[in-house]
Amino acid sequence: MRKKLLLTLLLSSFLLIGCNSNKSSTNTDTLIGVTNDKTSNSSSPTPTLVVTDTAISYSPYLSLGNLIFFPDKENNNRLSTMEEPKASGYINQSNMKDIFEYPIESIAAINDIVYFSNGSDGNTLYSLNYQNNEAKKINNNYALNLTATLDTLYYINKNDNNKLYFYNAKDSTSGIITNDSFGKFIINGDYILYQNLSDKANLYSIKLDGSNKMKLTDVSVDSFIPYESEVLYINSEDNNTLYRTNPSTRKTNRLTLVHGENLKISDKKAFIIDNDSSNRLSSLTIDFGKNTASTSKLTDDAINNYFPTQKGIFLEKSPDVNKSFILK
């Protein structure tokens, strides 16, 4: 009887130790990283995407107060400031106000603190207090395509297979959103729309906390924007033609033939580099009822890239790749 009682006590102690050990392991895993690709399974609800009218995307031009921060192409892409240009045209050196020693790739701001990728230090992440002219290194990540919303900065870490990282400026926490390799991405409300380079540049969405991952297309995409509760995208596998997809119904349609690249949106106005117009920048007019789209030319020159801001549209023209222009 005593032997049985002793054996029972020993087994109970072993089971308790085993349970406590498992709990400790789970807590540790939760603390490592923020997300681990929270995709759905058979018991999980179907992922959803709530499309809003706002889109925050990467831009090397940052409006802060009455100043514009940007990389000056004519000065080795050094971080520079200027006051808002009064008219459309070439941005020359007489427009410059301040020039810093840091060459930059991208830039964003949170609460008047400027964040940038410092080209003189391996494009690692830095912050700049412009009022005090104080720069501080944040981390050693090779930060590309800085994009900010509320208190959080999002960027692609080239040193980690182009995964999307976040940095919370309020509590200085950081981590990975998902293990996918990112191409282009935009922030749309509580979601991120992104070009998934881990899946042939197909279009995906994921919540800002790394949950609710959802595949939106089975084709590679050049670019994409939210538009009237749907998503417009350029289908790279169909001669860069404009398509639409409804995340709720999963219905996809090709709009009347518009071919282009670098689809963007600002203040509910859609823009495209129009391949049918010698790569000129054009505005887009969409009629979902008729399933049609039309373009209106905005520039006479071919455009390599452009960045809509509150101060105007900054242009990178094909004939003058080392100069900056603005369209008011």
Image (spheres, helix red, strand yellow):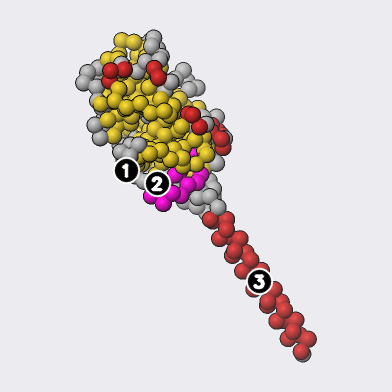
Residue 303 in the image: state x and y as whole percent: 37, 15
| Numbered badge on residue 17 | 3
Judged by depth in the image, the label closer to the viewer, 3 or 1, is 1
- The residues tagged by marks 3 and 2 sit, at their Cα atoms, a distance apart of 40 Å
Q: Is residue 122 above or below residue 44?
A: above
Quick check: can you spot residue 290?
no
Answer with mark 3 or mark 1, whichever residue precedes in sequence: 3
Q: In the picture provided, is 212 more to the left or to the right than 3? A: left
Residue 276 in the image: state x and y as whole percent: 38, 12
- The residues tagged by marks 2 and 1 sit, at their Cα atoms, a distance apart of 9 Å
- Dot 2, how many residues are within 10 Å of its Cα: few (below 14), some (14-19), or many (20+)? some
Magenta range: 164-176
Residue 15 in the image: state x and y as whole percent: 67, 72
User: Which residue does the numbered mark 2 point to in the structure image?
Assistant: 169
Residue in view at x 37 percent, y 15 percent? 323
Quarter of the view holding residue 106: top left
- Dot 3, how many residues are within 10 Å of its Cα: few (below 14), some (14-19), or many (20+)? few
User: Which residue does the numbered mark 1 point to in the structure image?
Assistant: 111
Residue type, numbered disc 1: Asn
